[in-house]
Amino acid sequence: MYRRNGKPQSCEPCRKWKTRCDHARPVCQRCHDRNIAVQCFYHPAPMSSSSFRHRISSRAPQTQTQSVAPEIPHDVAASSSSGGAAATSPQENPFALTSLEEVAVESCSLPVVGPLSYSADVLSGVRVLKLLYVHRICDSLVRESYRRSRVPLLPYKVVGDILRSIHDVLTQCATDGSDRHLSELSTQIFENSSQPLDPHQSMTVEEYISLFTGSQLRWEAIGNVFAVAGRAIIASPDNDPIFVENGAPGRANLLSQIAEASDLCLSFCARESCSNELLVSLQVNDLMLKTQQHGDSSYQAWRRLGDLCATVYFSGIHRQDGDERDPVFLAQLKRGCFASAFYVDKCVATFLGRPPLLNYRHCSLVPPLDLSDDVLVGDPACLTEAIEQVSSTGWNCHGRIYRTSLARIPLLLAIFKDKVIELRAGHYDVDTLPRANQILEEAQSSWEHCPDPLRYDRFNNADNDDHSNVNRFTIISIYLDYLHSRFLLLQFMAAHMDDSRAAFLETAQKILATVIQATKYRASQIDLSQDYSWITLYYGIPSATLLAQDLHSTRHTQQGPSPPHVAATETIRNLCVLVSMLSWVVSPIHGDYHICKDAERRLSQMVDEILDRVNSPSVDTLASNELFDPMLEWVDYGNLGFGPVLFG
């Protein structure tokens, strides 16, 4: 959290002792080293009166997010209507506060009756509602997110109705400028959130949305607004007119407040212990926000992934193979939410070398049908007709790219990754290689059935506008994911079959070349920097390291040209370009900055070693072996990613 002067807030012990605080959350390193972690907390208003401090100290301190403002996006094309409420000026705003600290000061005088912990939650709920009212930019950010986002989890009609409902409810509370109404609203939202959603098969879309809007407003719905808005902030350039037109505070300050509000909404949902598809959507969006803020290897992101998988299992969304209680549109919506959760789980597992939390053997794995949102939330008769028109493999027959199109293919590829992880973790026997070949054939078949508009190897490069570039980047990411699935499996097969090594190295070369090609697709109105860092780290580094290792070993064991499967000149050139990419792909405020710099250092040393050996074949081999072996520990088929080498 930031102070009004723009500097990070210090914890109370460091502030009182006038010592330098590293601002780490939930406990700073200095307090941890002094064994006073229990006393370390960040006061919402440290310079307020002693009577206010006494009231604050009577409640358990609220956990707050780190105020790091990185840059990362996930973008693409889903058009949405541009309606929405206009921003309220400070003169017209009865809740004219600028930060959660000020909201906390104002909220302490609210007449809340009830148990201490519940009263504290209600007051925190008032803070969230005031922040939502003050920063009406959230409406614009959510609309921009749906215009730019790669794979929105919920149809825009659902999120748009949530925004309108929040606007109407807060406007009604603000008519007399009294905080009492906000306190009553917060209490009501807690009561709503404690009740399960109760859909039935004949329910219409409007009836379903009414379960969490209007008088039935829930924290899951509000949290989705904050999480999506936070992702939109990170995906927006610093000079985006949306910040100026809405009179928003500094970008870093706004992101810190919105991320904290998303955390609070999740804590409210955890308190009420009611899981549903809205909570899954909120957790996925917040997980992506955490990776963008703190880095893909951060503890915050890993903890949020654990919460997400627990909700998926507890709510039963992993078994969406025919729930008679759900109407058709809701069953498709739940499948989309599960697809996103399953895909993210496999990405983290292969990136960090950790076991996946969602196992394919315990899930129904039915992807959502490739239907447009207009059809999905439209007339039931039209929906039934559209379902009958999809192909036998579930794709639409019109050659269009819908929101669900971008959710289907990652799920299908994630299933193969999960099977590869299981295969690599098991014991090798006579059935292992036949099973590996079967998985490889299944993955190839699924890719061949993928529509041409979603395949980068068949993509049309005619257009050059920003919108097309976002589409290209999305398609290239899908292609990289397919190649990565092959890469993991062929890596395992190459360890046991010499005839698989050529295909393995060829796949690695394709991945490296495709990662470099992705840098061509820039969009001036959308910040894609964090996407570049992800594809560079997740796809580029493992393939580049394997190719460097192959070139290194080739130079040791033979004289003359490289074997046919190693295009040495092209590979060295691409390795040099990748090293250059790692130097600019992220800025120091990005969550993955230190990982990229470490990868740049290691890969640069490896390339230097290869080039030195080309120029001086007689160079001593001891240093090269010491350099390559530690970096290549991840190549062992028992390890699933390069993460443990970089992250310890």
Image: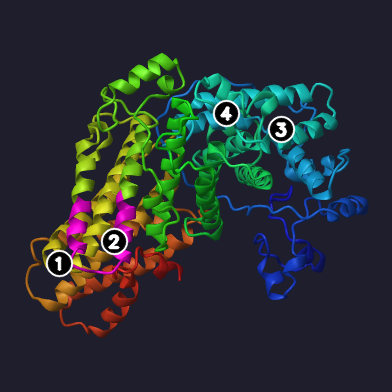
Residue 567 figure quarter: bottom left
Q: Residue at x 46, y 21 (%)?
A: 377
The answer to which of 399 and 520 lies nearer the viewer is: 399
Question: CA separation, marks 4 and 3?
Answer: 13 Å
Question: CA separation, marks 1 and 2?
Answer: 15 Å
What segment is highlighted magenta in the picture? 416-440
Disc sitting over residue 140 in the figure = 4
Q: Residue 592 placed where, x, y %?
A: 47, 57
Q: Earlier in the sequence, mark 4 or mark 2?
A: 4
Question: CA separation, marks 4 and 2?
Answer: 46 Å
For the residue labelled by badge 1, is the local secondary structure a helix, a strand or a loop? loop
Which residue in the protein does label 2 denote? 423
Q: As shown in the figure, which amino acid type bears the numbered disc 4?
A: Ser
Q: As shown in the figure, which amino acid type bears the numbered disc 2?
A: Leu
Disc sitting over residue 134 in the figure = 3
For the residue labelled by badge 4, is the local secondary structure a helix, a strand or a loop? helix
Q: As shown in the figure, which amino acid type bears the numbered disc 3?
A: Val
